[in-house]
Amino acid sequence: MNVNNPIGYENSRLFSPLNLDHPGLARVKKAALNERYDEGLIAFKQYLLSRTYPKMFLCKEDLAEVCEYVSLHCPEELREVMKAADEVVAQTFLFRFPWDMERTCVPVTFDGPIDWDHIPDGDIEWAYMLNRHRYWLALGQAYQMTGDEKYASTFCLQLEDWIERNPVPSEQTTGTLTWRSIEAGLRCGNWIKTLPFVINSPHMTSHLLTKVFISMHEHAEYLASSFTGWKHISNWGVLETCGLFEMSVFMPEFKRSFHWQQLSIERMGETARLQVMKDGIHWEQSPTYHHEVLNCYLDMLTLTINNKIEIEYSITETIRKMAIASLYWAKPNHRQIMLGDSDNNDIRSVLTASAIVLQDATLRFGGYDRIDFDNVWNFGSNGIRYYDECPVLVPPRLSHAFGHSGHYVMRSGWDEQALYLYFRCGPLGGGHGHADMLHIDIHAYGKELLTDLGRYNYSDHTPLRRQLKLCSSHNTTVVDDIEFTEVIDTWQFGRVASKTCSEWITETGYDYVSGSHNGYKHLDDPVYPSRQIIFIKPYYWLLVDYFDSQHEHTCKQYFHFAPGEISTSQETGICRTENKHEANLCIIPVHASELKVELSEGVISYEYNLVEPNYHVSYERTHSGAFSMMQVLYPLRAGETTLPIVKKIPVFLYTGELADDSSVEACKIMLPQSDEEHIIVVCHRPPARAIDSYVVDGIQIFGEVVLIVTKGEGKEITVIK
């Protein structure tokens, strides 16, 4: 070997890790043994162009049909991809794809060489996004759609520049912007999906392809050696190990590929066992990361199916549980809740992929009407045909409880106009969690009404990041203006509230959920907050917040709204949204005379790095001893204006004495433009003795939560619990 010839030495580096006895590499082996490395590289490229195995995501035979499909059925997405590709050609970077984890709204342009370590506006996540290379996939797709060599040329130039200027570290590190293991793993997937689209270009020379495959080998070895026990429980472990698995499948010609594959399958099995709770929710309690992890598992499962690679059945079932959880978790507008560090993402693409990979007609219900832009590039002609022919099954349940992870969803139907309430009573979920115990979201009649405020960004240089994680930034309750979970900074927490109990009941005519936490047990006079929600289908929810203590405290309920106008009445305490030509929400207090209502301006972040103004309302009550704050949450269809009449009514012991409010309360709801009246009785302490038999509106009852419906001359009494 002539080490004085650096190009020859560089070219020879490919052959050492190759298994030259791999089927199809005879010409490559002959050239390598005779040190005719350039000849060997040309033979290797020809081999790659002609190989039919492994089967990755999209067969080259499907490219023409896929290009025709997206032109016909996905024009808007195609325009966005072409725009992104043209920006990358101009070295302008704006991360705006649907599943970009940290999107940006301000473009950055490099006039000279790309600075792969660039950090604009103090946001280090920008540099991480730059080094994940998702935007190169847009170049590959644009090249296939147009045949314009500028897209392939840009990819090849930028890829070679990155490889040359970012050598692999000698050991695993988080101290660089380019070689954290999570970026390395995500890069693997993006390179693998892009390379087949441009490999036929004359700009992808055999010399460049050599560099690419050497770098791929380095990525795989780096990921194989960088795993730690912490990554078994972190989404990092899934995202980087998926990249290692994809590399092991894509490069069977390397001696170490089988080792990488066995290692990555073992790791993915362990992460699936540890990270996904029994009910299918990812333990980090952030839908964005739940879906990022699910997307990785789906990519893995796709490649195991395509290449007949055996994995444990439990991994497949975990993937199915995650997808089913996503289906039941989703709002009627097909978007994920912005719980924890999550954005307002549409999850239909995830459910579309899940339906195809898992061959599941119920998941097909939650996906797009036809296969979408991103998925058609992954599944090709077979994906198009399967999705068109797959039956659509409506999910067997409406409301759903995720008891292990602490998420509860009430819904009146599966259409986009359905009433939907989400309730949160579960563990924090690590650094991506927020202080959101007992939080609720409401979506009704096609409109988002109450919502989480999102995450904004991951930087401590602005106080808004921490602010959006606070208890008071969620639709929950706070005692004496003390946060029940202490937020220190972007990732750190102090004292953390834990769930003390929860209960769930779902029936045809109603749903019931309750939850409580211990976030105020440290006070000199401990306070124990609990929340009950009764959904009277399909009309409204009764929200009951109860605070059990000995002495006087001031408690607040917070309600954060989607952007729009809000009105409040100091006299009645009623708060209502003022959305013209859209649905609205009215909050009607049961204890109006004892509450102070305040309307305040705030902000909401629907996606990373973006904020817009919104409003929130707080209800405040000061009381000594145990007491409640009760609200009727009443959604109105577009154009409706008439509200129900809500009033507190007395509850008597069966012996005739007036019952104490700290023990039991009742309210009457008279539905508008109807002769139907509801009385809901809520016992704050479970009835246990004969004396706990109460009389309300002349009717004797015994139960913890009782619904009395009067319609015309008839009465129906239901013990909810």
Image (cartoon, rainbow, N blue to C red):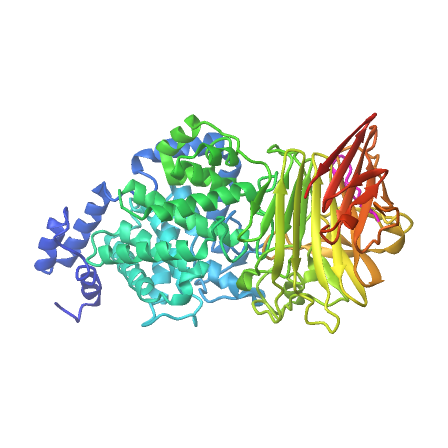
Q: Is residue 608 left or right of residue 593?
A: left
Residue 281 visible at all: yes
Q: Is residue 574 above or below residue 467?
A: above
Q: Quadrant of the N terminus?
A: bottom left
Q: Nearer the viewer, residue 439 or 41?
A: 439
Q: Position of residue 257 (x, y in %)?
A: 24, 55
Q: Position of residue 183 (x, y in %)?
A: 42, 60
Q: Is residue 510 above or below residue 239?
A: above
Magenta-drawn stretch contains 586: yes
Residue 139 visible at all: no
Total numbered circles: 0
Residue at x 84% of width, y 62% of height: 623
Q: Nearer the viewer, residue 649 or 180?
A: 649
Magenta-drawn stretch contains 188: no
Q: Nearer the viewer, residue 144 or 256?
A: 256
Q: Position of residue 528 (x, y in %)?
A: 71, 62
Q: Position of residue 581 (x, y in %)?
A: 76, 34
Residue at x 83% of width, y 42% of height: 695
Report the magenta residues as a range: 577-590
Q: Quadrant of residue 477?
A: bottom right
Q: Is residue 326 left or right of residue 695?
A: left
